[in-house]
Amino acid sequence: MGRKEKKDKDHKDDVCWLSVHGGVAALLLCIAVFALLVRVAVSIHPYSGAGDPPKYGDYEAQRHWMEITLNTPAKEWYRNSTINDLTYWGLDYPPLTAYQSYVHGLFLRFFHPDSVALFTSRGHESPIGKLLMRWTVLSSDVIVFFPAALYFIIVFYTGRRDNCKEDIAWHLAIILLNPCLILIDHGHFQFNCISLGFTIGAVAAIFSKHELVASVLFSLALNHKQMSAYFALAFFSHLLGKCLRRQKPFLEVLKLGLVVLGTFIITWWPYLYSVDAFMQVLSRLTPFERGIYEDYVANFWCTTSIIIKWKRLFTTQLLQLLSFNATILAALPSMVQQIRYPSNQGFLYALLNISFAFYLFSFQVHEKSILLPLLPASLLAVEEPHLFGWLTYYALLSMYPLLLRDHLILPYVSLLALFILFNYSPIRRQGRKERGFLSVWKVLLITLLLSCSLVLHLIYLMLKPPERYPFLFDAMIMLLCFSQFVLLAAYTNVKQWKFMSHSTSIEKEKKIL
């Protein structure tokens, strides 16, 4: 079958899926509208740094980037100057974020020029300005994240024999109603939906055998937020494993490499006129001077710092080396598995395991970085509903101190309740692994862990920590969440290696479509 015939067949498969599941279309639309309304409801609450001068918070950072990209030439966006003071929320994301800020800045300037005026707009918090800023995130979700999620659902369920209307609807709802993503993007205020949307699109493109499209989409994700590198080794190992099983592996790898290189060149073009300009941007993306961690994040370095004072005992350079080696070692089993036995299901586990490795061991991790392992976990939710529910619950808990500082306790509790309602909804079919009863010991352990987390919620909300240990409650939350993340990562790493006989369809492929 020729390349054109295969593409036509894939297109017909998608059309057939929509035709056969025509009754599902209205339900999926209702879910998307509901997910959008939930985002709108969260957006009326406070945001990071609201009314808190002089630097405010992430909301002001995003607004300031719109101001800078709109009022200065591209070559000045990452360079310190009298116009662009990098100490005041200097741009520290790749060029695609800068272009996105520019487009959103045009939108704000059209309706409310004062909100992005150079210098005078610092700390701008007018009602119309806040409304327009919230619209930029909502529109990003609708334009990027929602279509990507729908694309994945269509591809994931095309050709499956056990399709069920309830499962399809539930799966889309779980992806779109991720409480952590909604609270960070529409409460705290960020644009994670763009890079995560590109990543979902790339995964769906791989599932539909469009690896070149996947390479473009994932390159865009990397060029929007450098934290998308959490997924890079999974994409690399999976695509390499597939290429090695084809008739001309070198040519296949070369095609992918050229597509990635071309995407990066186009994105970085304004900064390729000199080595100095390129390095200036690169230096802004790697803030090693901030240390191996900030605040209290539930990863290895921060958790073990209670016993081992990493920052005191080791230089920043040595910590960079240690974290790099630890991350690679933790990611290596998943990479090897996908190179040897590439499969779609194994790829999703690799995305989860490798992003977990980065979250637990890499340099300069933030609380919000847990959104990255959560993404592949949501794509695996039908296969691993309990794992996804457990991870989401503790991911939320790990961000609880941050969200409480943003005065987002009401949407936090509301979205947690909504998530529990959807995740354990009776419309979802019970998988074979879920049938039967949990052992008494498992029930007791789960009850104990949930009780501890509920107590920590109340303690953090109602009590003041001792003056000698002002971050005691943060550390307790961090320890509990870290323990759960390690257990979940160990389980999913073992689970991934069970997919050693599911690559037969991939081995039959001859070349990239």
Image (spheres, rainbow, N blue to C red):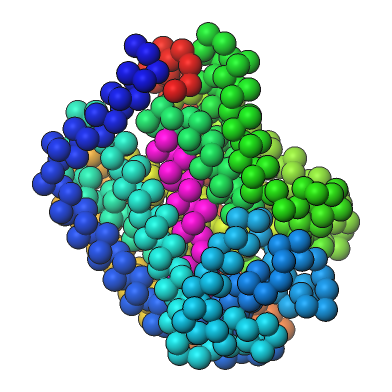
Question: Would you say 32 lies left or right of 361 here?
Answer: left
- Quarter of the image containing the C terminus? top left
Q: Which quadrant holds residue 180? A: bottom left
Is residue 188 on the magenta stretch?
Answer: yes
* Rendering coords of residue 428 (x, y %): 19, 49
Report the front residue among 173 and 382.
173
Farthest residue to the top: give it. 247
Res. 449 visible in picture: no
Report the front residue among 321 and 254.
254
Res. 509 visible in picture: yes
* Rendering coords of residue 469 (x, y %): 69, 80
Q: Which residues are drawn in magenta? A: 183-205
Q: Which quadrant holds residue 455? A: bottom left
Is residue 436 on the magenta stretch?
Answer: no
Look at 82% across and 63% down and name the residue there: 289
Q: Is residue 327 above or below residue 82?
A: above
* Rendering coords of residue 166 (x, y %): 17, 47
Q: Is residue 148 above or below residue 414?
A: above
Q: Is residue 466 above or below residue 69?
A: below
